[in-house]
Image (tube, coloured by chain):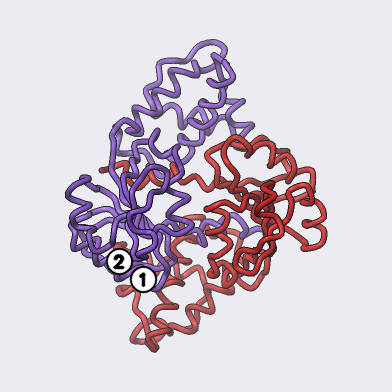
Chain colours: A red, B purple
Amino acid sequence: MNAKISDKVINRLTLYHCILQEFLARGEEFISSKQIAKLLHIDDSQVRKDISVLNNSGKCRVGYIVKELKSCIEKTLGFKKQKNACIIGAGNLGSALAKYDSFANYGLNIVALVDTDKKKISGMVNGKRIYDLSDFTRVVAEHGIDIAILTVPKEFTQSTADIVVDAGVKYIWNFAPVVLNVPDDVQVWNENLVGNFLQFTYSI
Amino acid sequence: MNAKISDKVINRLTLYHCILQEFLARGEEFISSKQIAKLLHIDDSQVRKDISVLNNSGKCRVGYIVKELKSCIEKTLGFKKQKNACIIGAGNLGSALAKYDSFANYGLNIVALVDTDKKKISGMVNGKRIYDLSDFTRVVAEHGIDIAILTVPKEFTQSTADIVVDAGVKYIWNFAPVVLNVPDDVQVWNENLVGNFLQFTYSI
């Protein structure tokens, strides 16, 4: 892995990866930077620049070799490096994420969910068990949880984050529109949907 | 509005806005760049730089005036400019987004959902009606839909996008891990969860 790849490039590389999967499924052997650029409405020089960070050898006269470029992105972005996650909050969003099977292809194994609702506890979502939030520390130990995915209602997000921190989990992927107060050794990624929406609609 | 504000700054400003709401709810009158920076684990010079794009006048000796800074972010990012959206796909993710009441505070009015499942059609999610996808063009006209939010399964995403384009909607917020093929005058924001996850976990 090359630690210098910027967030924007990582984001685009995963989109190229989606396109490559599509091309592979259709039996296409080659792809050009122009084809990728057209689908994403970006400049093809940007595509070539992004791909140049990959040490991709699968370049030929007619473009990139789909299979090799795809595997090259997977290697560079560490898709093979498995991380175990637990979803906290088995509501609509938590269930949607638990059903999102694509995550596994990118190294994110959602192994369990937790909730406080007695009616949900012991149930399953997409083959993953829902545990009692009060058993979270045990779930972390037994399943080797690296990442907690927070999908609880806004008002419970900080108290739930405190439980996550106490259980020793160092990475929190937070879907609530709340900025969490956590110790310096815990990393939070705010899946800031409102921010994303505003980036998109700013010009409307 | 200042069209030159970058995506990263917009994203951070919405996080500052979350913090300001929290401070306001607790009855705090002032906030310093250091307090904001500490919560987000970033540098306070970054916070001051971001806020400097706002033409914020609510600066005083003890920091920013919470109420004025909050309203300044709202004005700059156009929270008052209402946009109407329709969610396509009333599954777990679509339902979760329909229940996400915070969106309305940021100018995103989710006014309806559409689906193809006869069991769901005519039902309600959080006070919003689920219509038949085949009535989408009528829904767009009647509700003045600006944005289509795509939360359909991966394999139906492109065909659904085609229906959205035919109905004349120019903005698509796509939650599926699929790169859509749309005309140049249609803007797509890929809510690339996998890309976001990899940005976050790249260093784990």
On residue B160, the disc is 2
For the C terminus of chain B, give its image quadrant. bottom right
Percent position (x, y) of residue A170? 73, 50
Foreground residue among B88 and B29: B88
Percent position (x, y) of residue A108? 62, 65
Q: Secondary structure at mark 1?
A: helix
Percent position (x, y) of residue A70? 49, 78
Kindly identify which residue carries mark 1.
Answer: B156
Classify residue A99 by image quadrant: bottom right
Percent position (x, y) of residue B25? 55, 21
For the N terminus of chain B, give its image quadrant. top left
Q: Is residue B17 left or right of residue A89?
A: left
Within-10-Å neighbours for mark 2: few <14, some 14–19, many 20+: some
Q: Is residue B130 left or right of residue A12?
A: left
Foreground residue among B129 and B41: B129
Classify residue B84 by image quadrant: top left
Amino acid type of the residue tagged 2 in the rendering: Thr
In whole angstroms, how far apart are the C-alphas of marks 2 and 1?
A: 6 Å
**Residue for point 48% across, 57% down:** B92
Q: Are marks 2 and 1 on the same chain?
A: yes
**Residue for point 57% across, 16% down:** B28
Q: Secondary structure at mark 2?
A: helix
Tell me if label 2 and label 1 are in contact, CB under 8 Å.
yes
Within-10-Å neighbours for mark 1: few <14, some 14–19, many 20+: some
On residue A25, the disc is none
**Residue for point 42% across, 64% down:** B176
> To which chain does the residue with label 1 belong?
B
Q: Is residue B159 above or below residue A113?
A: below
**Residue for point 22% across, 59% down:** B135
